[in-house]
Image (tube, rainbow, N blue to C red):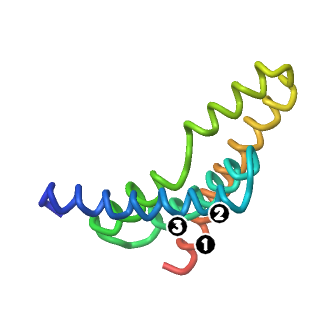
Amino acid sequence: MTDPLLAAALVGVGGSLGATARHAVGLRIEGRRSVVAVNALGSLALGGVLAAPVGSAATALLAVGFCGAFTTFSSFAVETVSTATGGEADIAIGFAVANLVAALSAFLAGSAVVSAFA
């Protein structure tokens, strides 16, 4: 895709959908569990999209837009720091490790599944 305006529009549409989906998950799952859930699910989807033989338009819409807005590094940081400064450093460390392991494992799984069928 060579049109930067189209790319920006696709990222915007995907981002709007991703942010809305992120909010919906937050309404169903509270606190740290929702952060791990969206980061793992978003990483799974991102791995699949990046492994799929899709063009740059789909990558802009899905990978950059949707997955970028759906996953949440900022909430991860806030939850980790607030838990640690609240006197629960051991829980904060466990949360940070669990989040990273879940996201990386999910990304690899999404990539592997799509690569096996693509």
Q: What's the CA distance linking mark 1 and mark 3? A: 7 Å
Tell me which amino acid carries mark 2. Answer: Ala
**Label 1 belongs to which residue?**
113
Residue 86 location, quadrant: top right
Tell me which amino acid carries mark 1. Answer: Val
Does 110 sit above or below residue 97?
A: below
Residue 5 location, quadrant: bottom left
Q: Which residue is drawn at 69% across and 25% down?
A: 81
Q: Which residue is drawn at 49% across and 61% down?
A: 20
Q: What's the CA distance linking mark 2 and mark 1? A: 6 Å
Q: Which residue is drawn at 61% across and 39% down?
A: 75
- Dot 3 crowding, Cα within 10 Å, few <14, some 14–19, many 20+: many
- Circles 1 and 3: CB atoms closer than 8 Å: yes
Tell me which amino acid carries mark 3. Answer: Gly
**Label 2 belongs to which residue?**
109
Which one is earlier in the sequence, the residue at label 1 or at label 3?
A: 3
Q: Position of residue 97 (x, y in %)?
A: 75, 37
Label 1 or label 3, whichever lies nearer to me, is 3
The foreground one among 45 and 16 is 16
- Circles 2 and 3: CB atoms closer than 8 Å: no
- Dot 2 crowding, Cα within 10 Å, few <14, some 14–19, many 20+: some
**Quadrant in which the N terminus appears:** bottom left
Q: Residue at x 77, y 28 (%)?
A: 83
Does 85 sit above or below residue 49?
A: above
Q: How many marks?
A: 3
- Circles 2 and 1: CB atoms closer than 8 Å: yes
Which numbered dot is residue 48? 3
- Dot 1 crowding, Cα within 10 Å, few <14, some 14–19, many 20+: some
Say which element carries label 1: helix
The foreground one among 90 and 105 is 90
